[in-house]
Image (cartoon, grey):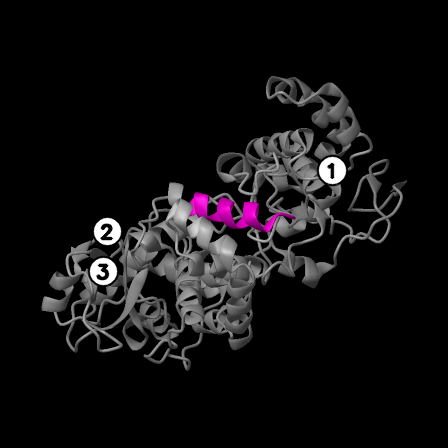
């Protein structure tokens, strides 16, 4: 539930989208907990452990699980020194010792030695995760295609059924935490399609692998130790602590450390079970949003219409103004209704540039982005919640004729911007984040173009020609 937290079958699709559309809030794409990628690359099968010897892949003597798709043997695309083939093989050979070296810290956290020994006995690394960790899609779908996917009629219908089925629980949670039940249901729907696509990898094995192998070992050591705490406490039984390749679990996809911070025992049975207890899962998700700043009785944002000749330099996540101030600039709701609380503050987001819909985003939008730091994700959550509540679709059309740039083209665009003296906040990396969008706006303004910050194919052609 943080920039490092990852989860959900649609997350793989969203990561591609966030990178293309600049949806990440100033961070690299998260190490996605992608059950969707599991489907693409092959799910783990169960079975006895047998040693294998492969050339260029799993080193001799390192056990694997029969039926499990093996590591490719290739270095990670990030270029990180811990992601070279040699480093991965060496770390895999040290895996048993690495796990045992974490016992003193587990003990300091209150994990019993008996539990530690039982849970780590026979634990083996899944080196296939190294391929998933550095996976970078060569091509991406458009922002609007992902909203079509996430806010489908089937998902809206199922969400309304879920809200009716668990109406008493949603009402009690809404009263206790002040978080809109439709938002919680939308997170449930987007994260796991209402629990039908949670992931089937062992969270303990995934986090242990990533704690000992690869480029994010320090982060995942904390996740592995938190998973041990969860199992030692008995909040979730081992056979149900399964999830994505990065260790997220449950219908709303908690990472183990996020579980520690936000999970609550809402059904009063003495366990915080976000996997099998609907009250605990719903309340824990609401508690997460509340602690991230959700404001009760407020919405997440409004679709708005931008007037002709508007200065798109004002579409900036740092420029917060009251709704009445935006209205004085000619911004109006797409529905034609008045803003109900004119003194509320918001910023303007134009995710597809001047040819697409525009939105005024409130503080609750930022709270959703703390759950997952992507504008695409937060917009999908807010819009799905509105649709389940009975609202209509987005009014303004998306520029569906636009071709979304490939990763190589985004990298090239950044190179052109840097050569022309525009600061993108980092070296070119193919990720169009807020700093790159700001650089695009400055280039557009200097070239006499509407500065909407949209990374289009036409803009790349313009950069190439100058």
- The residue pinned by badge 3 equals 442
Can you tell which mark lies on residue 89? 1
Mark positioned earlier in the residue sequence (3 or 2): 2
Using the numbered discs, state the Cα–Cα distance from disc 3 to disc 2 in whole angstroms. 16 Å
Q: Is residue 296 left or right of residue 254?
A: left
Residue 417 higher or lower than 161, as above or below: above
Q: Which residue is more in the foreground, 39 or 170?
A: 170
Q: Is residue 272 visible?
A: yes
Q: Is residue 181 left or right of residue 434?
A: right
For the record, the magenta segment spans: 276-289
Mark positioned earlier in the residue sequence (2 or 1): 1
Is residue 32 located in the magenta-colored stretch of the structure? no
Circle 3 SS class: helix
Name which quarter of the figure residue 320 lies in.
bottom left
Can you tell which mark lies on residue 425? none
- Residue 9 x, y percent position in the rendering: 60, 59
Q: Which residue is more in the foreground, 341 or 22?
A: 341
Outermost residue on the front side: it is 168
Circle 1 SS class: helix
- Residue 374 x, y percent position in the rendering: 42, 55
Labels 2, 1: front one: 2
Q: Identify the residue at horizontal 23%, vertical 57% (top origin).
A: 346
CB of mark 3 within 8 Å of CB of mark 2? no
Q: Is residue 30 left or right of residue 37?
A: left
Name which quarter of the figure residue 384 lies in.
bottom left
- Residue 315 x, y percent position in the rendering: 23, 62
- Residue 152 x, y percent position in the rendering: 51, 74
Q: Identify the residue at horizontal 68%, vertical 43% (top origin).
A: 241
What is the magenta segment's predominant secondary structure?
Answer: helix
């Amino acid at each position: 539930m943080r920039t490092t937290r990852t989860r959900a079958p649609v997350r793989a699709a969203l990561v591609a989208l966030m990178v293309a559309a600049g949806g990440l809030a100033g961070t690299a794409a998260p190490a996605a907990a992608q059950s969707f990628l599991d489907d693409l690359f092959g799910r783990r099968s169960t079975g006895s452990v047998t040693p294998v010897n492969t050339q260029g892949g799993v080193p001799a003597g390192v056990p694997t699980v029969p039926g499990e798709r093996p590591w490719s043997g290739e270095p990670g695309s990030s270029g990180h020194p811990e992601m070279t083939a040699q480093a991965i093989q060496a770390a895999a050979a040290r895996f048993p010792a690495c796990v045992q070296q974490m016992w003193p810290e587990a003990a300091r956290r209150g994990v019993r030695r008996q539990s530690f020994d039982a849970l780590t006995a026979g634990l083996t690394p899944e080196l296939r995760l190294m391929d998933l960790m550095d996976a970078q899609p060569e091509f991406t779908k458009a922002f609007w295609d992902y909203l079509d996917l996430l806010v489908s009629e089937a998902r809206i219908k199922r969400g309304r059924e879920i809200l009716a089925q668990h109406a008493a629980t949603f009402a009690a949670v809404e009263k206790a935490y002040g978080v809109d039940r439709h938002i919680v249901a939308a997170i449930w729907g987007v994260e796991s399609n209402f629990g039908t696509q949670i992931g089937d990898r062992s969270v303990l094995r995934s986090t242990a692998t990533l704690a000992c192998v690869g480029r994010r070992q320090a982060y995942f050591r904390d996740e592995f130790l938190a998973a041990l705490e969860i199992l030692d406490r008995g909040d979730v039984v081992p056979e149900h602590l399964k999830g994505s390749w990065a260790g997220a679990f449950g219908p709303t996809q908690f990472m183990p450390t996020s579980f520690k911070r936000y999970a609550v025992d809402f059904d009063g049975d003495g366990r915080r079970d976000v996997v099998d207890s609907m009250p605990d899962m719903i309340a824990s998700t609401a508690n997460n949003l509340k602690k991230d700043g959700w404001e009760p009785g407020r919405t997440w944002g409004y679709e708005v219409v931008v007037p002709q000749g508007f200065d798109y330099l004002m579409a900036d996540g740092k420029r917060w103004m009251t709704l009445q101030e935006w209205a004085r600039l000619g911004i109006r709701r797409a529905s034609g209704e008045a803003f109900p609380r004119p003194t509320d503050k918001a910023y303007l987001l134009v995710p597809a540039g001047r040819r697409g819909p525009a939105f005024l985003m409130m503080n609750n939008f930022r709270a959703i982005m703390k759950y997952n730091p992507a504008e695409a994700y937060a917009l999908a959550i807010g819009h799905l919640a509105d649709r389940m509540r009975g609202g209509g679709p987005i009014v303004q059309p998306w520029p569906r004729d636009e071709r979304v740039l490939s990763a190589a083209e985004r990298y090239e665009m950044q190179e052109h911007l840097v050569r022309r003296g525009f600061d993108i906040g980092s070296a070119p990396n193919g990720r169009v984040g807020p700093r790159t969008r700001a650089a695009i706006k400055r280039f557009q303004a200097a070239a006499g173009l509407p500065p909407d910050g949209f990374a289009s194919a036409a803009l790349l052609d313009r950069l190439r020609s100058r």
